[in-house]
Amino acid sequence: MKNTRIFKRDFTMVVIGQIISLFGNAILRFALPLYLLRETDSSSLFGAVTACSFIPMVIFSFLGGVIADRVNKRNIMVALDFFTAIIIVVFYFALGQIPLVPLMIVMLMLLYGISGAYQPSVQASIPLLVDYEALAKGNAIINMVSTLSNLLGPAIGGVLFGAFGLTPILVISIVCFTISAIMEIFIHIPYQKRDKEKGVFATVRNDLIESFYFVKREKPIFLSVVGILAIFNLVLSAAMIVGIPVMVVQVLGMSDADLGIAQGALGLGGLIGGLLAGTSTQKIKIRYNYIYLMICSATALIMGISLMSVVPSSIGFWLITVMSFITMCVSTMFTISIFTVVQQQTPIHLLGKVMATIIAVSSCFQPIGQAIYGELFENLETISWVIMVGAAIVSFGVSILSKRIFYRLEKGE
């Protein structure tokens, strides 16, 4: 009988490296926007800066997908982790010497750009390190690692930031990225060198054209899935990313530690969602994925209700925290099921590019949404519940429209 044990040496080391690296990333991505929000007290500026930071992630996801299919994936992880540690050191010494807003924009753009280039290598390495039968579990484990980091990062970051400020968070992040990079040096990921065209741009262009024609001719349903994901990111994901810090800190007037609890609930929800997805991905048919989106829409509605003046701030905070948990739990199950199907239906030599394209295109509208929601929360602060209720209504409509698309995806069209 074929050995389908999932925790083989190299996959285990990838998982451990992800735990360390993503924790450093999570604690930093929690602290930097909060620092900006506390220093400027402007939700519109907060939304604009976070929107700018997402743009490089979209762009570099494409580039990361091409690189992941042509360069040793281990080397990509090592180089990017070392580079991240270096830019945090530079940021530490630049803080206070350079105006805050442009410094924060550059730093967040670099962090998200690196993340965009990094993740296709991780996603494309999973089918090379685990058996086909264990692919869903492998995806679930990687997603659980990410969400565990998102649980611990904000929880610990909220306490440290409230007590000591930004400095210890920067130091912890530097240590995490350095340790992760050193450990990843010893990982072996199967790699077969491919012929390349003359020039980097020709290689990138031809690789993207190859993946585009594959999707257009062989898997046109992928385009419809990307469209649904893009709209959902524009309407709901952006509302959550900008809205949760603004709702907790500005609208409800809660503390930094409370914000850490609310965002930690996102991580806990992702962890539970990953556990559930690892056991249920093959049992729950992809055609029912629209239900996940409907549940997320319902949680946004309840968040909106929690901001109404008749709801006490403490109760509103816990409603938002619980809804954050449910949202992340459900969205993680949704993401894992989508990624697993795409990996199963895409040739290995195109996997990095196709995964990167799906992630990048589906995320490209998110910065626009973040900028819009920043302005909305700035100008409608007294009736901010309207923003989340409106997002919930639109998202529910998108969920209904996605039903047929997920049915076709399950059929392999």
Image: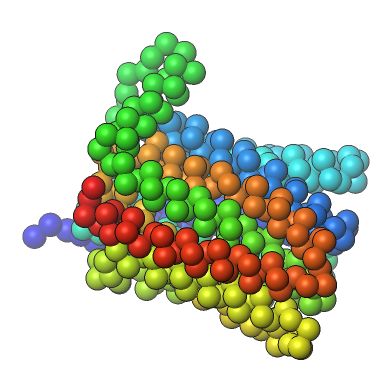
The image quarter in which residue 39 lies: bottom right
The image quarter in which residue 364 lies: top right
Work out whether residue 353 or residue 131 is closer to the camera in this orientation and state it: 353
Compared with 353, 248 (above or below) is: below
Image position, residue 187 (x, y; %): 40, 44
Using residue 413 as the reference point, say whether residue 206 is left or right of it.
right
Using residue 106 as the reference point, say whether residue 98 is left or right of it.
right
Using residue 2 as the reference point, say whether residue 204 is left or right of it.
right
Work out whether residue 250 or residue 30 is closer to the camera in this orientation and state it: 250
Q: Residue at x 70, y 71 (%)?
A: 386
Can residue 11 be seen?
no
Image position, residue 185 (x, y; %): 46, 41
Numbered marks: total = 0
Q: Residue at x 52, y 57 (%)?
A: 232
Compared with 12, 322 (above or below) is: below
Using residue 353 as the reference point, say whether residue 183 is left or right of it.
right
Q: Residue furthest left?
A: 1
Compared with 278, 83 (above or below) is: above
The structure's colour scheme is: rainbow
Work out whether residue 73 or residue 242 is closer to the camera in this orientation and state it: 242
Q: Residue at x 43, y 31 (%)?
A: 66
Can residue 18 be seen?
yes
Quarter in which the N terminus is drawn = bottom left
Image position, residue 23 (x, y; %): 59, 59
Image position, residue 87 (x, y; %): 70, 40
Q: Residue at x 79, y 77 (%)?
A: 252
